[in-house]
Amino acid sequence: MIFETLVTTVAPDGRVHFAPMGARYAGDEVVLMPFKPSATLDNIVGSGCAVLNLTTDVRVFAGCVTGRREWPTLPAERIAGERLVSALAHVELRLLRCDDDAQRPVLHLERVCERTHAPFPGFNRAQAAVIEGAVLVSRLRLLPPEKVDDEMTYLQIAIDKTAGPAEREAWSWLTTAVAEFRSPAGKAGNVESRAPATAETLAVGPAGKLHA
């Protein structure tokens, strides 16, 4: 199984980097597969640590693929890292080994510290829809427009029926990103496209792209 998480890492200059990423749990280990090149990969290999954040604030996922990369953090307890303030829980990780690969190295990390900050309120369809929408936005350069439209239209149903203010805000960022990408200025390259040009964003699976 792959779980949608938010990974925070710290660059050599102290900047905190946010990356939605699919995580696997293998016993006591957490397994991440960031793409090459990616800041997440460089930061984990360089620092030897990372923080896995479990959050239902899907604005962070949508924000990471639409140019909104500043989110409140607090210092980790046992590693030189930062955890997301809005996380329901976080896991501090230390790198055990890296199995190199030309496209997606496999990082094996041990759990150093785990903390719960708030209860999980339950599943919400709109939150899941935002995550799926973020995947689509990260792939605007790869997918046919009609596929994006069909899937966004279907996901809109969950937004309309079950979203709260945070989910609606996140969804508006995604729909705006699609419109900007398709605008004459966006096609001409005269405005900064919010759709990521690299593989780092939301890694969704072995063959997927989103997740740094």
Image (spheres, rainbow, N blue to C red):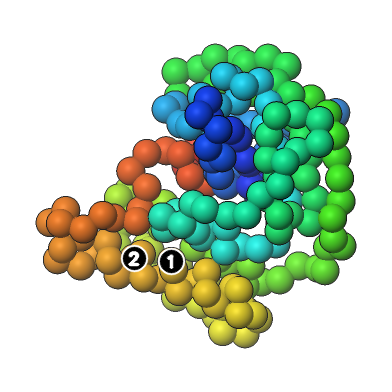
Q: Quadrant of residue 107?
A: top right
Judged left or right of residue 116, residue 37 is: left
- As measured in the structure, the alpha-carbon distance from the residue carrying label 1 to the one carrying label 2 is 6 Å
Residue 76 rendering spot, x and y as whole percentages:
75, 38
Q: Quadrant of residue 129?
A: bottom right
* Relative to 145, residue 203 above or below: above
Front residue of 192 and 177: 192
Number of disc labels: 2
Label of residue 151 in the image: none
Q: Residue furthest bottom?
A: 161
> Element under label 2?
helix
Q: Residue at x 44, y 18 (%)?
A: 102
Q: Amino acid at mark 2?
A: Val
Q: Residue at x 44, y 26 (%)?
A: 36
* Relative to 98, residue 85 above or below: below
Residue 139 rendering spot, x and y as whole percentages:
38, 51
Residue 190 rendering spot, x and y as whole percentages:
15, 56
| Residue at mark 2 | 178
| Tag 1 and tag 2, C-beta contact below 8 Å | yes
Judged left or right of residue 10, residue 198 is: left
Quarter of the image with the N terminus is top right
Q: Quadrant of residue 181?
A: bottom left
| Residue at mark 1 | 174
**For mark 2, does the 10 Å Cα neighbourhood hold few (<14), some (14 to 19), or many (20 or more) residues?**
many
Front residue of 51 and 23: 51
Residue 102 seen in render: yes
Q: Amino acid at mark 1?
A: Leu
Residue 52 rendering spot, x and y as whole percentages:
71, 41
> Element under label 1?
helix
